[in-house]
Amino acid sequence: CVFTNSQFLNIKPNSAGIILNKYNDCVFEECTFKGTFQYQIFDNCKFINVIMDYSLLKYNFGIGKIEIEYYSNEELERLIEIFQLKI
């Protein structure tokens, strides 16, 4: 599916297999994503108070637990700000 200029508020998919969707200029607010939200494509999306399982960062953004150690403090702070990471 492709979603454009859509707003997702307080969605918490945790048992459905939601994969391979594209989101263009979308807003995600107060959402919680767990292990079933894999291989998504986000283009110019905004995340507000979103919680995403650590494992999904790898599948959706190419950020893994090991790789995060190699970011500079400035880059890591920016990632935390953009994705509302809880590290």
Image (cartoon, helix red, strand yellow):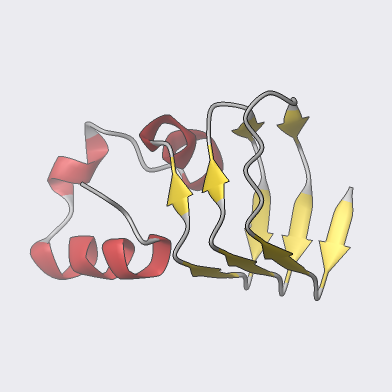
Residue pushed farthest front?
10
In the displayed structure, would residue 45 be above or below residue 51?
below
In the displayed structure, would residue 61 be above or below residue 30?
above
Residue pushed farthest left?
73
The residue under the point 78% across, 45% down is 21
Left or right, 8 with reference to 53: right
Left or right, 17 with reference to 36: right
Left or right, 10 with reference to 66: right
The residue under the point 20% across, 60% down is 76
How many marks the image carries: the answer is 0
> Which of the two residues, 7 or 79, is positioned nearer the viewer here?
7
Q: Position of residue 54 (x, y in %)?
A: 37, 36
The residue under the point 42% across, 30% down is 55
> Which of the two residues, 74 or 46, is positioned nearer the viewer here?
46
Left or right, 33 with reference to 86: right
In the displayed structure, would residue 19 be above or below residue 87?
above
Q: Position of residue 37 (x, y in %)?
A: 63, 35
The residue under the point 74% across, 33% down is 19
Q: Position of residue 44 (x, y in %)?
A: 62, 73
Residue pushed farthest right?
1
Q: Position of residue 33 (x, y in %)?
A: 55, 41
In the displayed structure, would residue 26 be above or below residue 50?
below
> Which of the two residues, 8 or 25, is positioned nearer the viewer here?
8
